[in-house]
Amino acid sequence: MADNISDRLAGLDFASVSPQEFAGIVKSMSAKEINEVTRGDLRRHILKEVFGRMERQFRPESAGALEAVIRWKITGESDVVYETTISGGACTVTEGRTDGEPRLTLVMGDADFLKLVSGNASPVTLFMLRKVKIAGDVGLASGLTRYFDIPKA
C-alpha cells in the first residue's frame, strides 16, 4: 500500500493541491505510511512545499506585535531544519539554521510534523505524548497554531 501512496505523492503537483486536499491526503495515511514515503527527494519536496506555504498561511492579525524566530527540526532519515521568523506582521521562512537564537525550537519526526501542520494532530497531544520536543518559550509553542491558517481535512 505504501508504494501506491508513494507513487501518488511522487506524481502530485503540490502547487495545485489546496491545503485542505493535502490535509486529506495526510489524514488518509498512517504514521508508518508517512514515514515510509518521506524519504529522499520526495521528503525534501514535501517539506519545502509545506514550509513555503507557511508564509501564505500566516495570520498577521493574530500575531500582532509578535517578534520570534521559531526553529523546526524535522527528524527522519536525516535531520532537516527550517526557521520561521515572525516580525513586523510578516512571516518569512528560511531553510537551514541561521545565526540567530530562536525563541522556540520544535523537534519532531516527519509523520508528526505533517499531521500537525495539516490539522490532523493536536499540538498539545503531541507534546503530552512526547512526540514533539519543545525548547524555549512554551507559551509561544502553546499558541503557535493560532498564527497560521491550519487546514481541516
Image: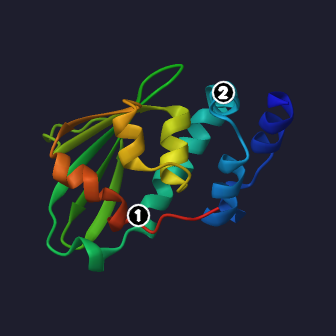
Density class for disc 2 (Cα within 10 Å; few <14, some 14-19, many ≥20) is few
Few, some or many residues within 10 Å of mark 1 (<14, 14–19, 20+): some
> Can residue 96 be seen in the rendering of this structure?
no
Q: Residue at x 15, y 46 (%)?
A: 137
- Disc on res. 55: 1
Residue assigned mark 2? 32
Q: Residue at coordinates 50% horizontally, 37% vertically from top-left? A: 112
Of the pair 100 and 31, the residue shown nearer to us: 31
* Type of amino acid at the residue the image marks with label 1: Glu
Quadrant containing the C terminus is bottom right
Q: Is residue 7 left or right of residue 144?
A: right
Question: Is 141 drawn above or below residue 91 in the view shown?
Answer: above
Q: Position of residue 114 (x, y in %)?
A: 54, 44
Q: Amino acid at mark 2?
A: Lys
Above or below, 6 relative to 88: above
* Percent of width and height locating residue 75: 45, 26
Q: Which is in the foreground here, disc 1 or disc 2?
A: 2
In this orientation, does residue 99 appear?
yes
SS category of the residue bearing label 1: helix
Quarter of the image holding residue 33?
A: top right
Q: Secondary structure at mark 2?
A: helix
User: Residue 76: image x %, image y %?
Assistant: 51, 23
Q: CA distance from mark 1 to mark 2?
A: 29 Å
Residue 49, position as x, y percentages in the image: 56, 51
Q: Quadrant of the N terminus?
A: top right
User: In the displayed structure, does residue 68 sit left or right of residue 114?
Assistant: left
